[in-house]
Image (tube, coloured by chain):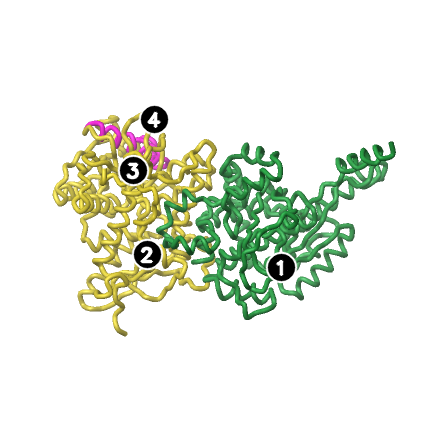
């Protein structure tokens, strides 16, 4: 009887375990700071006793939602330190994690195929030096660097979510930023990846067998054992601010008590660029919203139905499916082999042995990495 | 400084810097590569079958003139066995179309192709001058576009032809992709990226053999082949929204020349992700010709040949002018630089990367070096594994 009670207790506890969300916070990002504040207020409201004065709709029963906050710092160390402390002081109820960009070299999820990227400099020992060498000397242009860095940050966040046991990754990207992302990705030949990058929904995390050996720059092929492959292969990514314009958020951060502007460093966006963005939103509000909604209509290959079907299958079946679907070594999106066959001449056809040895990249990532 | 040699033949002096990838080429190699790339597009998309009767939608502008010239050359060189006919639409715009039709008539004689002219007045009882007189200048391009598409169909049927080729180029396709993305029209985006389009209402299919050719290269080809074409813009108002997409495309091209093809690639990929579309990217089916995508009422713009750099401060017109001046200077053994005027919209241009010198292109110059565009020169001849070679059949 005691054992039965213990078992039912476990089941009850599992069913009512708090949903863990991981919020990506950018140190200078007004959007993600606003989202953090919104979630904080929401949590405070839910935790407050029902009779609490001044709290509307407050429900008793304690904590219903638990958040883990992960911060991916790409700024210089000094700026990051100051901002880091300000955030922790303001939101003491949240757990903050700090992730250096160089930890992309040792992801637990193994979601980056480093063999598909230019080789790391083995003479350098520190991971951050290796990564800086890769970004600043191996990539042809600043735009390539920005692309690769953005994708690395995305991998870090997904990895952090998996490591922290979160099922959902929340990104603070607003409508305007999503529209900008859509247009820039279209111009870079990454149209195929838009449904994954801009739309909400589950993301199939790739796991590459060939991986770096302890970040030393040597690429070795290791076989993923069962014990290592505990990480879930699927993660949900949501953009809760996808319907909010950047100008609305700029207003919101000044209206909170105290204003969120205290947390944010002075904007390094040029006044001219700010004016241009504002003018774009004022003059073409429907265009900005349209771009994001249009992308929202695009299907991921296999369709939504296939995604749902896959999500209900067992882990073993899922892994089998995953192993059959080739994914891009950098962005992790299913490779568009039919499209690539048609366009291969544009980038120069790779010899078969080179393709086998090196990981494969999608068209957009090849453009970024190989120029 | 010793003159740079052509990157392909390595013997002739490089006179042309390809707008697509900044490769330095001599005149002969540029013309050959341009024709080879169009040939590849035709093969990989299985556009024609031997003995097919094809109408070339000819407006007298640079795109359709180059299309006619290239198709005639390729038809003879690769023995396509096509029966080519020029099909022109007379919208009835005095001071514009009457002059351009004279060019088409000369082209018909130069290329030894039959010419059929179909007029709006005989088909609909209205000329565009009368339409504009009635509705004003605003929005008349919509009527004209609808009329022209149907006129091409009806003209082709009069000739007993089931295939019309048009001079849409990569810039036009990229522009349409962005325009439809901006206005949220996925159906049109999907249609515009397809190389072969058709209509439910008619069995005449349309295709765009110059779909992967840059507008600037078309101008260069026309110039170096000394083609006779008409470059005046339509006297009626442009389509404003298309104009802003065009400005955007030209700005992107200045920052990164490969951007146009990248947008086309994105558009093709996105078209396959539109709900209800097939996932098969490859247009080269096992059957002889590509299956047309329904074109409905609109697939692409610029069919009137009037989108000639209109919203970019007459960029193409300026390029043409400069090419002529350049030619004179070349005769005197001088090297000149062409500067394309900046677009009107101040501040609307994306911030250029460090390497770029965005405000000008030079023909021929050797200043810019785009590492990420260098491979785009590789002819797509090898690209399609499942290429259906209709000529073998």
Q: Start and end of the magenta stretch?
A: B134-158
Of helix, strand and loop, which one carries label 2?
A: loop
Residue of label 1: A103
Figure check: A303 above or below A280? above
Screen quadrant of the C terminus of chain A: bottom left
Distance from Cα at disc 3 to Cα at disc 2: 24 Å
Q: Within 10 Å of the Cα at label 2, are there few (<14), some (14-19), or many (20+) other Cα atoms?
A: many
- From the viewer's perspective, is B192 left or right of B330? right
Residue of label 4: B200
Q: For the residues carrying marks 2 and 1, which lies nearer the camera in this image?
A: 1
Q: Please give the label number shown on residue B207.
A: 3
Discs 3, 1: same chain: no
Q: Name the residue nearer the viewer: B133 or B91.
A: B91
Discs 1, 4: same chain: no
Q: From the image, state the color of chain A.
A: green
Q: Name the residue nearer the viewer: A114 or B240.
A: A114
């Amino acid at each position: 009887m005691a054992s039965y009670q213990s078992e039912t207790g476990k089941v009850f506890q599992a069913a009512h375990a708090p949903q863990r969300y991981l919020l990506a916070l950018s140190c200078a990002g007004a959007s993600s700071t606003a989202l953090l504040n919104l979630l904080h207020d929401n949590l405070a409201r839910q935790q407050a006793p029902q009779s609490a004065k001044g709290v509307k709709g407050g429900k008793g029963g304690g904590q219903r939602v638990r958040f883990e906050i992960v911060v991916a710092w790409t700024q210089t160390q000094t700026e990051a330190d100051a901002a880091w402390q300000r955030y922790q002081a303001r939101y003491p109820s949240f757990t903050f994690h700090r992730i250096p960009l160089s930890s992309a070299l040792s992801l637990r999820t193994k979601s980056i195929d480093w063999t598909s990227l230019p080789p790391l400099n083995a003479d350098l020992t520190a991971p951050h030096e290796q990564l800086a060498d890769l970004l600043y000397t191996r990539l042809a242009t600043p735009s390539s660097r920005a692309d690769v860095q953005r994708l690395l940050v995305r991998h870090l966040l997904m990895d952090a979510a998996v490591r922290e046991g979160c099922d959902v990754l929340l990104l603070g990207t607003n409508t305007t930023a999503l529209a900008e992302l859509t247009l820039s990705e279209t111009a870079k030949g990454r149209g195929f990846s838009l449904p994954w990058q801009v739309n909400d929904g589950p993301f199939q995390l790739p796991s590459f067998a060939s991986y770096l050996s302890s970040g030393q720059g040597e690429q070795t092929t290791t076989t993923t054992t069962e014990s290592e492959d505990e990480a879930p292969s699927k993660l949900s990514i949501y953009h809760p601010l996808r319907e909010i314009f950047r100008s609305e958020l700029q207003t919101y951060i000044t209206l909170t008590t105290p204003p969120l502007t205290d947390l944010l460093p002075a904007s390094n966006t040029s006044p001219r660029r700010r004016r241009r963005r504002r003018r774009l939103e004022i003059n073409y509000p429907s265009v900005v919203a349209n771009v994001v909604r249009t992308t929202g209509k695009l299907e991921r290959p296999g369709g939504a139905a296939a995604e749902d079907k896959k999500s209900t299958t067992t882990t073993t079946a899922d892994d089998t499916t995953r192993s059959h679907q080739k994914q891009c070594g950098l962005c992790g999106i299913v490779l568009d082999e039919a499209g690539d066959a048609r366009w291969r001449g544009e980038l120069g056809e790779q010899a078969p042995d080179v393709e086998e040895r090196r990981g494969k990249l999608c068209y957009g990532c090849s453009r970024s990495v190989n120029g | 400084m010793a003159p740079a040699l052509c990157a392909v033949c390595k013997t002739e002096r490089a006179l042309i810097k390809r707008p697509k990838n900044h490769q330095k080429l001599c005149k002969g190699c540029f013309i050959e590569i341009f024709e080879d790339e169009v040939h590849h597009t035709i093969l990989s998309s299985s556009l024609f079958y031997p003995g097919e009767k094809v109408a070339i939608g000819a407006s007298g502008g640079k795109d359709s003139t180059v299309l006619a010239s290239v198709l005639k050359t390729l038809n003879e060189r690769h023995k396509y066995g096509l029966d080519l006919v020029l099909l022109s639409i007379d919208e009835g715009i005095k001071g514009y179309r009457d002059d351009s039709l004279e060019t088409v008539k000369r082209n018909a004689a130069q290329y030894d192709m039959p010419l059929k002219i179909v007029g709006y007045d005989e088909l609909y009882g209205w000329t565009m001058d009368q339409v504009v007189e009635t509705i004003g200048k605003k929005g008349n391009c919509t009527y004209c576009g609808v009329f022209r598409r149907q006129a091409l169909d009806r003209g082709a049927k009069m000739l007993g032809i089931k295939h019309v080729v048009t001079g849409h180029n990569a810039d036009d396709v990229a522009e349409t992709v962005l325009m439809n993305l901006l206005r949220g029209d996925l159906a049109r985006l999907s249609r515009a990226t397809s190389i072969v389009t058709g209509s439910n209402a008619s069995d005449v299919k349309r295709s765009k053999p110059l779909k992967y050719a840059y507008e600037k290269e078309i101008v260069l080809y026309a110039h170096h082949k000394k083609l006779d074409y008409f470059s005046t813009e339509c006297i009626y108002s442009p389509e404003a929204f298309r104009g802003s997409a065009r400005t955007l495309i030209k700005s992107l091209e200045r920052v990164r020349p490969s951007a146009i093809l990248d947008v086309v690639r994105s558009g093709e990929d996105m078209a396959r992700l539109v709900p209800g579309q097939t996932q098969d990217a490859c247009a080269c089916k096992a059957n002889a010709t590509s299956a047309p995508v329904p074109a409905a009422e609109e697939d692409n713009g610029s069919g009137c040949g009037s989108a000639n750099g209109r919203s970019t401060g007459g960029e193409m017109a300026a390029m043409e002018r400069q090419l002529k001046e350049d030619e004179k200077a070349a005769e005197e053994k001088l090297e000149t630089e062409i500067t394309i005027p900046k677009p009107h919209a101040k501040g609307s241009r994306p911030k250029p990367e460090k390497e770029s010198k965005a405000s000008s292109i030079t023909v021929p110059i050797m200043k810019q070096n785009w590492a990420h565009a260098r491979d785009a020169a590789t002819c797509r001849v090898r690209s399609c594994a499942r290429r259906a070679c209709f000529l073998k059949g």
